[in-house]
Amino acid sequence: MAKVIGVRFKPVGKIYYFDPLDFEIYQGDKVIVETARGIEYGEVVLPLREVDDSEIVAPLKNVIRIATEEDKKKVEENKKKEKEAAKIFVEKVKKHGLEMNLVDVEYTFDQNKVLFYFTADGRIDFRELVKDLAAVFRTRIELRQIGVRDEAKILGGLGICGRPLCCAKYLDDFQPVSIKMAKEQGLSLNPTKISGACGRLMCCLKFEQESYEVLLKTTPKVGAIVETPEGRGVVEKVSLLKGDITVKIEKADDTVMLYECKAKDVKIIKDAQITQSPEEELEPEELEELKELEE
């Protein structure tokens, strides 16, 4: 076991462990630490705790110091420099005739490196651009091509639900999302309705999938034969999140009754089987369009 604190360098970025040494550090404190990129300024989001050695990426680096007022002023200065660097980058890209869209600029705390995050269709030969930028900034230059999901996380925005994007609000890492999840959650396989602002499948599908999987195990499917307080019937409709089902019951007098009740109030005699996967229900063109959303 090792004593660590968890530090984050971006508002919704990954959390990295550091050795606090003998410093009294609390959640919310700002600290100066050594990273693979150099000296960085971060916020403590996980206070002192013990974690298993298997959770640590060796070697565990130390906290250099608790951030001072001078350190905080330097961070503000870096932010101003980032805005100027963005303008210069756009000018240089235009000069070199490159198809690149700048997303973000980041100075390391010690100003030993400037990172430019951009998007582009396909690979870009930016070697000459880097030389040009290095001559202007006189420091190390790093260009990182990012995907559309990372772009949405950095820029932020509102989802189709009207709330801030999950990736920009609280998801510190991206998880794979599949068409199967959308199907199991009863969503239309219309690309415009299941894709987020980034043009890929919505992250919330993965976030909510575990709850749906639990409900699917305990809720009868459409077509299932169930025993209700009003008699035996076939499930006609299911509202998974509400836990409501509608059962079609054929009476002895040849009349048909639609009985609405809670899924927990019926006994499953024979559950229905899913005979087709989402892929089998779609035309090849539709499937190809949906597959692109998973990338």
Image: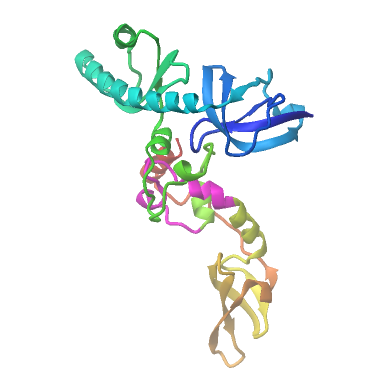
209 left or right of 142 in image: right
127 left or right of 45 in image: left
Position of residue 102 relative to residue 236, above or below, is: above
- Quarter of the image where one finds residue 188: bottom left
Is residue 208 a member of the stretch shown in magenta? yes
Depth check, front residue: 41 or 264: 41
Q: Residue at x 62, y 78 (%)?
A: 233
In the image, residue 218 lies at what x, y percent?
A: 67, 63
Q: Residue at x 43, y 26 (%)?
A: 73
In the image, residue 141 lies at what x, y percent?
A: 39, 13
Q: Which residues are magenta?
A: 186-209
Q: Residue at x 41, y 43 (%)?
A: 290
Would residue 281 be seen by someone viewing this image from the given angle? Answer: yes
The N terminus appears in which quarter of the rendering?
A: top right
Residue that lies at the very extreme toward the right in this rendered image: 1
In the image, residue 182 lies at what x, y percent?
A: 49, 51
